[in-house]
Image (cartoon, rainbow, N blue to C red):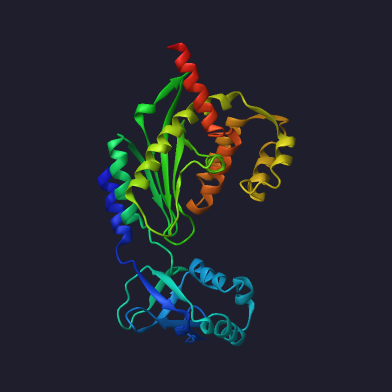
Amino acid sequence: MHLAEILSTVQNKADGNSDSQVNTGTLSYQKAPEEAKEDFHISGALEDENTHELVFDDWALSQLMARFRVPLLFFRRCSLLLRGDIFSEHITSQQKDLLFRLSNTPGELEAAHVRAVVSDRYTAIDDVWLFPVALDILDSQKADYREFTFDDHFSVLEVTFPDTHIEHQDRTYVGGCRITNSETGRSSVWIEPTVKLDNRYFVNRTAVREQELPTRVIHRGKTYEDKIKNLVITAKKIAQVGIIQLEEAREKIFDTKLFLKSIEKDPVFSSRIRGVLAEQWKAQEIVLALDAAKEILDLAEQLPLFARIPLQQAAGKLTGLFSGHKNRMASLVKELNQRS
């Protein structure tokens, strides 16, 4: 994948998007015309001072309801009349300022398509700003651009650093970096280290966070280009230690039953992931951590992007990738000094 292709994709993705401050006191919830897809109709005043029909996707509507602690599933089950009363009392009457992120720039009489509802303190770090900044430093690091994938809520750029390339017993490891962003409030910006092995990308956000290593930028306050660039360089350094850890994980063996028991309350391993692992291991008493992680990553590739990310994180945690990074780095430096 070429740099120009990524930049063009990011720009095309941004075309037509807009933002508008909205005071919920202007919102109304009414019965829709008979021919409408939904039985309700929400309207409100945007910054252009015109009242527009507001068409929410499911995520945006759930965000709006969550802001006022109205359970969306309960709300949908109510009658149209009751929904109108709930909306008026819990949302319209609050007169709260929010930022509506739109997937269009509506004309005076056009409907506004709402893709996200976020706090008025939200700082937009959109792909069209983020990736050119990140790509500038990645280019200086001679990165290879591997994949750029996106859906309505997430964008993920996968890169590798060829100068971290290591071959060992017919296995090829390459350190890399994954940049994840959400323009709709589903995630912060993550710039996290990766290790590529056999066309699979291994990550472990949990280990990085537990060590308070800098890998995240939240959508609030000021944004600084220097911080983005520093996170890329940090990710590259961590990835090089991860290569050694991933090779060591080839020898890591664990008891399947004990492991499944130990992750019952671990939020990284959802009930779905635990179910998949239990099914795969039902005839195995022990398993190699790296083999199990590969199976999870292969499963993840079959899923939509939003569902893929938790599985990828679980696979990385399974191997222990990036755990104890600082201590591991110190021991490596000590070994190198002794050899020299």
Q: Is 257 left, or right, of 39 in this rendering?
A: right
Q: Residue at x 51, y 79 (%)?
A: 38
Number of labels in the image equals 0
Q: Residue at x 50, y 25 (%)?
A: 330
* Nearest the eye: 105 or 163: 163
x, y percent for residue 303: 52, 49
* Quarter of the image that includes the N terminus: top left
Q: Is 130 left, or right, of 26 in this rendering?
A: left
Q: Residue at x 33, y 36 (%)?
A: 144
- In this rendering, does residue 22 appear at all? yes
Q: Residue at x 31, y 44 (%)?
A: 135
x, y percent for residue 35: 46, 84
Q: Is 78 left, or right, of 306 in this rendering?
A: right
- In this rendering, does residue 1 appear at all? no
Relative to 67, does residue 154 appear above or below in the rendering? above
Residue lying furthest left: 4
* Quarter of the image that includes the C terminus: top left
x, y percent for residue 200: 47, 36
Answer with the quarter of the image where residue 299 lies: top right
Relative to 170, does residue 13 appear above or below in the rendering? below
x, y percent for residue 306: 50, 53
Residue lying furthest top: 339
Answer with the quarter of the image where residue 283 lies: top right
